[in-house]
Amino acid sequence: MTLVASAVLFAFLLYVLGMFALGRGEGRAEHKHRKHRQGDRSIAAPTNAGHLLFVFVLPCLDEEVVIGASLDRLLALPQRNWIALVVDDGSQDGTAEIVERFTDPRILLMRRVPPQARQGKGEALNAAYRHIGTELIRTPAFAGYGREDIVLVVVDADGRIRSDALSVVAPLFRDPHIGAVQIAVRIYNATANLLARLQDLEFVTYTEIFQRARSRLGSAGLGGNGQFTRLSALQALGDAPWTRCLTEDLDLGVRLLSRGWRTRFTPRTQVWQQGLTRLRPFVRQRTRWFQGHLQCVAEIPRILTSQLPARIVVDLLIVLTLPLLVLLTTFSVVAFYASLISVAAGGGTEMFETVTANYGIVLIVWGLVSFGVAPVCAYAYHRAARTGVPRSVAYGLLFTFYCYHWLPVGWLALGRQLLRRSTWAKTRRLPEPPRRPVEPQRQTVS
């Protein structure tokens, strides 16, 4: 590991710790705002979500094992000012048939067939967006709501949104400059195995370190699950607000910000999703995410020429160039570990002197970069998952090595991008527990 690579990684460690500290300020500000709201009865309570209409959009491709249970959970929400539009994107299983059995008029089904179907999640969301903006908006359910009062909620077919989500998110949209809000994401099968547990820790860490801080800056990242976006903000992006980027959520957030909208994040509610329990689908998923992140690098010129505040420009540039940092430091990290293995195996004094040169600065930086964030991860996960302190510390240390999966994944993604390969096999869901029977059939929308 060269001194240059060491300096870059150490700077990244300082950035991470700085974001964590900034995020703590966001948490204190939100807590103070809640106390102020509770002490002043003239301020609207956060449980009043009635000024908005929430439209859940659930893009589905062969989701028969999870979609029924997900709709049951939506029907259990305490509020009634919502509609769920299930987009069957050319499924070949019983997804559509399961949705059609729900008789509640708030559950709608939109069926897409080839060649329009199976063009990616972004295209499925665009089809739903156009249907909402041109057809559904004329129906009685939308009467009395302006386009700035309609919020599209993107939820995965396996999403388990918490019952208080609408009441927590609604007050954030009272600010007319807020175009989108992202809620926290957790893994509901984290106890299945260590891989699923570390994915849960990853989402918690991302929330506590980055999302809280970026929300304070006004540029919180959007995800593909638990994403709340104002219809009027989407319309500012034209007829197809979601692109064919493999991470259409990241791309959407960047373009909303470049148009002058602000994005927020709240950790006060969550959506739970299914984690991957096998290595091969996990690597495939992460390769897709990394490739999508590389595709979003094309947004950098738009950011540089925008009228965004400097703090948001800097934040977005860091976020979009992080994949490049991973690629650039891969060889130095691999060489460093090879040197450690050689020394441990008795590789001689020359190799030992190389590793301990410059007063052991490389070893010191490696230790700080590798384990400097582990206490933060342990603290965050202990608070979020209520795990014991020893177990949280162990998870924090394991997470350090878990993060190294981005090194090979990054190069796999770069190879696919250079070869212009962007098609993906769908990741299969794990079966849901048995659910209650549903009532017979209802009308569909085509």
Image (tube, rainbow, N blue to C red):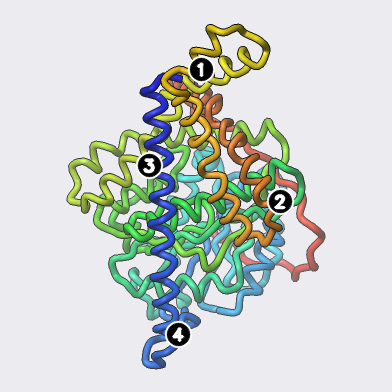
Q: 307 left or right of 412?
A: left
> In the image, which is nearer the foreground, mark 4 or mark 2?
2
Residue at left offset 32%, top offset 72%: 175
Image quadrant in which you'd find residue 37:
bottom left
Task: Using a 10 Å C-alpha cutoff, classify the residue at mark 1 as few (fewer than 14 neighbours), some (14 to 19) or many (20 or more).
Answer: many
Q: Is residue 111 visible?
A: no
Which numbered disc, 4 or 2, marks the residue that appears first in the sequence? 4
- Disc 1 is placed on an element classified as helix
> In the image, which is nearer the foreground, mark 2 or mark 3?
2
> In the image, which is nearer the foreground, mark 1 or mark 4?
1
| Distance CA(mark 1)–CA(mark 4) | 59 Å
- Disc 3 is placed on an element classified as helix
The residue type indicated by label 2 comes to Arg
Which mark identifies residue 319? 3
Residue 232 image offset from top left, x and y in percent: 32, 63
| Distance CA(mark 4)–CA(mark 2) | 38 Å
Residue bearing mark 4: 45
Q: Examine the rendered structure and indicate whether residue 84 appears above or below residue 429.
A: below
> In the image, which is nearer the foreground, mark 1 or mark 3?
1
Residue at left offset 43%, top offset 40%: 13
Q: Examine the rendered structure and indicate whether residue 399 appears above or below residue 405.
A: below
Q: Are marks 1 and 2 in contact (CB under 8 Å)?
A: no
| Distance CA(mark 3)–CA(mark 4) | 35 Å
Which numbered disc, 1 or 3, marks the residue that appears first in the sequence? 3
| Distance CA(mark 2)–CA(mark 3) | 30 Å
- Disc 4 is placed on an element classified as loop
Task: Using a 10 Å C-alpha cutoff, classify the residue at mark 3 as few (fewer than 14 neighbours), some (14 to 19) or many (20 or more).
Answer: some
Which numbered disc, 1 or 4, marks the residue that appears first in the sequence? 4
Residue at left offset 65%, top offset 54%: 158
The residue type indicated by label 1 comes to Val
